[in-house]
């Protein structure tokens, strides 16, 4: 084993023996990441889709600084505080329908775990046993913890090697046509006695390959879930907060899920925070004189005041600044700028939704070569599988966006690395 700087770190999704040395970031600002060697990279993916307002927005930074001076953290068991109370009320007001009850956690994956736990326990609280599985969709991704992994695509997803170790779920294709709709309807009927809920990423299956579906598909899933009496969990960890062009993706289908999971952009990319939000009907199944009906979950840093302050400041910016209009403008520019790739050999598809632009290759590219070429062009883009995608900050300057698009077009069209 050859020693090198950073050997004590075990990095995400990385074969450490084969990994090239990572780039060292020393500062961020706007849509730029500054490296230790002085180079600045334009961030095309907003730090895994989180920094929707750009890096180091002064309003969020000041809110966190002020909260840090008063109370960085306090346990949420038996105590409460104003940043969490305010944030919960604001989320309930922003979300559609009666999604009124907010349970805070510290990561998107754990938000999904809580949603699954809610779904299973609500049946137990009703006196119904045996409903311990969820219906999920092929191509989906919901996180890296055990329950979340079990709801990810079992064949193509990154967690397929853990199949024998995970809870067994029911998987279906997204109902893009009448035939899959019938298949989904039949699956819900066949497994109804053992299903606790249905879980879906609305409009875009993110880490599964940026697979997009129209609002009508989401509406169909919601309709069939209601027909079979199954709670619908919307995993909006990626799609929430403007990324698809509306504040929440479910709005485009007129769907009010029973439970929604939020994270990623919730704090504007400042620090870890997530929320699992349930309707009043779901919450009522836990409202009881029986202590056993309580939701037995409580992360140590649940509702961290610093993170809640950041999230409240992020919501301020959505209210005061034109984020949805910016997402629409980014989408139009992505659609126009990436369009020439549709005619290039080796390109299977180009698709855009909201502030998401995706180029899919006909084969699997050499990802290491692509990543290096993007860095050489002065941009930070992380292709995976057979795609390269852009999900920039909603505040990205037009010139930076054009540089990202040009880099993707030039590199994706070249045969090297493919």
Image (spheres, rainbow, N blue to C red):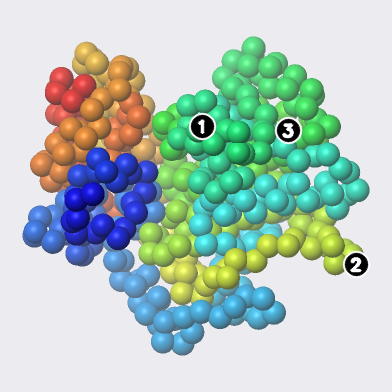
How far, Cα to Cα, is label 3 from label 2? 29 Å
How far, Cα to Cα, is label 3 from label 1? 26 Å
Give residue 235's position: percent from left, percent from top. 57, 44
Q: Quadrant of the C terminus?
A: top left
Q: Nearer the viewer, mark 1 or mark 2?
A: 1
Q: Which residue is mark 2?
A: 289
Mark 1 neighbour class, 10 Å CA radius: few under 14, some 14 to 19, many 20 or more: some
Q: Which residue is mark 1?
A: 160
Q: Is residue 401 visible?
A: no
Give the residue at x 13% y 55%. 40
Q: Is residue 167 above or below residue 90?
A: above
Quarter occupied by residue 222? top right
Q: Mark 3 or mark 1, which has the lower sequence index?
A: 1
Give residue 166's position: percent from left, percent from top. 62, 39
Give the residue at x 16% y 39%. 372
Q: Which residue is mark 3?
A: 225
Looking at the rendered structure, the secondary structure element under dot 1 is: helix
Q: Is residue 225 above or below residue 349?
A: below
């Amino acid at each position: 084993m050859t020693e090198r700087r950073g050997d004590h770190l075990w990095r995400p999704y990385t074969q450490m023996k084969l990994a090239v040395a990572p780039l060292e970031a020393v500062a961020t600002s706007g849509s730029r990441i500054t490296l230790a060697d002085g180079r600045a990279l334009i961030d095309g993916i907003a730090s895994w889709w989180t920094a929707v307002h750009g890096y180091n927005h002064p309003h969020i930074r000041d809110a966190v600084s002020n909260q840090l001076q008063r109370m960085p953290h306090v346990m949420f068991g038996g105590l409460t505080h104003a940043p969490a109370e305010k944030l919960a009320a604001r989320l309930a007001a922003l979300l559609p329908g009666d999604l009124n009850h907010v349970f805070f956690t510290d990561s998107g994956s754990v938000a999904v775990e809580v949603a699954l736990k809610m779904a299973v326990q609500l049946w137990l609280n009703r006196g119904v046993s045996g409903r311990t599985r969820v219906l999920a969709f092929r191509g989906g991704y919901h996180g890296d913890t055990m329950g979340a992994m079990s709801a990810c695509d079992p064949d193509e997803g990154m967690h397929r090697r853990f199949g024998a170790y995970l809870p067994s779920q029911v998987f279906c294709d997204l109902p893009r046509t009448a035939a899959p709709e019938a298949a989904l309807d039949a699956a819900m009927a066949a497994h109804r006695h053992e299903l606790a809920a249905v879980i879906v990423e609305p409009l875009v299956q993110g880490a599964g390959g940026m697979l997009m579906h129209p609002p009508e598909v989401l509406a169909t899933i919601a309709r069939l879930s209601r027909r079979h009496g199954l709670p619908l969990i919307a995993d909006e960890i990626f799609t929430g907060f403007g990324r698809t062009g509306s504040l929440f993706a479910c709005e485009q289908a007129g769907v009010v899920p029973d439970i929604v999971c939020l994270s990623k952009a919730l704090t504007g990319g400042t620090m870890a925070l997530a929320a699992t939000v349930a309707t009043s009907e779901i919450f009522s199944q836990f409202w009881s004189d029986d202590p056993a009906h309580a939701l037995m979950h409580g992360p140590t840093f649940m509702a961290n005041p610093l993170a809640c302050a950041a999230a409240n400041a992020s919501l301020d910016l959505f209210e005061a600044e034109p984020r949805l209009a910016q997402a629409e403008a980014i989408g139009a520019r992505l659609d126009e700028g990436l369009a020439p790739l549709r005619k290039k050999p080796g390109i299977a598809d180009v698709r855009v939704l909201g502030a998401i632009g995706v180029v899919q290759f006909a084969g699997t590219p050499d990802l290491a070569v692509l990543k290096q070429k993007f860095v050489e062009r002065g941009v930070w883009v992380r292709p995976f599988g057979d795609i390269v995608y852009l999900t920039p900050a909603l505040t990205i300057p037009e010139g930076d966006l054009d540089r990202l698009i040009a880099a993707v077009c030039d590199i994706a069209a070249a045969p090297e690395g493919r």
